[in-house]
Image: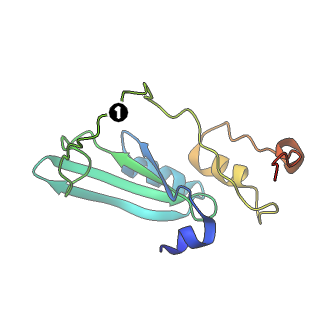
Amino acid sequence: MPITFDKHGDGVKAIALKVEDATSAWEETTKRGGKSFMKPTTLSDDDGELVMSGIHTYGEVVHLFIERENYRGAFMPGFRKWESVYKPPQTGLQYVDHCVGNVGLEPDESVGEVLRGCDGISKHPQLRRQEISRPNTRRS
């Protein structure tokens, strides 16, 4: 069993962000103080090339910058299209409008300040324990 699951339970390790220029995204975020997870790397196959890079964010989560303007394949180089026999109805989901990251109750530094400083995104709201805690309503 992966150590991340043993340690944290179900969750997300990597958040992929589609960008126009993965090299520029990595250069800007690391220049602003982001800690590099992956230097710009080009992957290619017969369907073209894809560039990806990434930074560490909070905890063990990373943000990956994915540039696929020159890639026509199904997912990434090395993958092939697979058709499932299971055909659930469409949900209509097209975009994710936000992501929530849970960090320790007393992190060493403000995650919002770290992200705000390196990614250039202006809205990184932070909620305090009093704002999100509620009485335990679970019934035995």
> Farthest residue toward the top?
92
Q: Residue at x 21, y 42 (%)?
A: 70
> Farthest residue toward the left?
46
Q: Is residue 47 left or right of residue 125?
A: left
Q: Quadrant of residue 106?
A: bottom right
Element under label 1?
Answer: loop
Q: Which amino acid is tagged 1? A: Pro
Q: Is residue 66 left or right of residue 131?
A: left
Most foreground residue, 52 or 79: 79
Q: Residue at x 40, y 56 (%)?
A: 53
Task: Give coordinates of residue 41: x percent, y percent.
Answer: 31, 60
95 shown above or below 136: above
Q: Quadrant of residue 102?
A: bottom right
Task: Give coordinates of residue 108: x percent, y percent.
Answer: 77, 66
Q: Residue at x 22, y 44 (%)?
A: 74
Question: How would you rate the neighbour count of disc 1 (Cα within 10 Å): few for under 14, some for 14-19, many for 20 or more?
Answer: few
Q: Which residue is mark 1?
A: 88
128 shown above or below 59: above
32 shown above or below 39: above
Task: Give coordinates of residue 64: x percent, y percent.
Answer: 44, 53
Q: Residue at x 28, y 43 (%)?
A: 68
